[in-house]
Image (cartoon, rainbow, N blue to C red):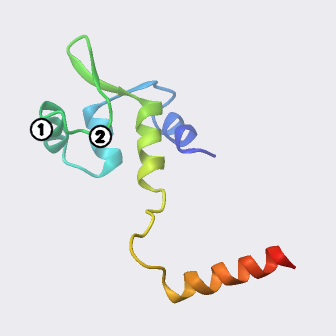
Amino acid sequence: MTTLDLLLHRFNGKITLNVSDIAQILGYCENHCRNLISQNKFPIPTFLMGSRRVARVDAVAAYIDNVSAPVKRRGPKTKAEKIAAVAKAEASHA
């Protein structure tokens, strides 16, 4: 089950989510989300639907998937990474 499926199920198939729903999903205060939106710093694209600010549920799901992806570590390789690279190289030559 994907993040999109989970969100669609949780919000009864709604294809847009209001700021209150988004704040609840992300664990933010609604006012914080609104402040970020007004400063053009909110990571999820939003738009006005009538007088309400909403975002597409697939955009929210994509953001969640990207945030939860492992961050590639910077800097020199750790000893474990070096050992794994050597083992992988030896396995490919065998």
Q: Which residue is mark 1?
A: 35
The amino acid sitting under disc 1 is Asn
Q: Residue furthest front?
A: 93
**Which secondary structure lies at badge 2?**
loop
Above or below, comparing residue 64 to residue 12 in the picture: below
Q: Which residue is mark 2?
A: 43
Mark 2 or mark 1, which is nearer the start of the sequence?
Answer: 1
Q: Is residue 19 left or right of residue 61?
A: left
**Which secondary structure lies at badge 1?**
helix
Above or below, comparing residue 59 to residue 88 in the picture: above
Q: Nearer the viewer, mark 1 or mark 2?
A: 2
Q: Residue at x 49, y 39 (%)?
A: 7
Q: Is residue 84 left or right of residue 4?
A: right
The image quadrant that residue 91 belongs to is bottom right
Q: Residue at x 56, y 81 (%)?
A: 81
Above or below, comparing residue 42 to residue 64 in the picture: above
Please tell me which residue lies in front, 19 or 37. Answer: 37
**CA–CA distance in space, label 1 to label 2:** 12 Å
Q: Which mark is residue 13?
A: none
The image quadrant that residue 43 belongs to is top left
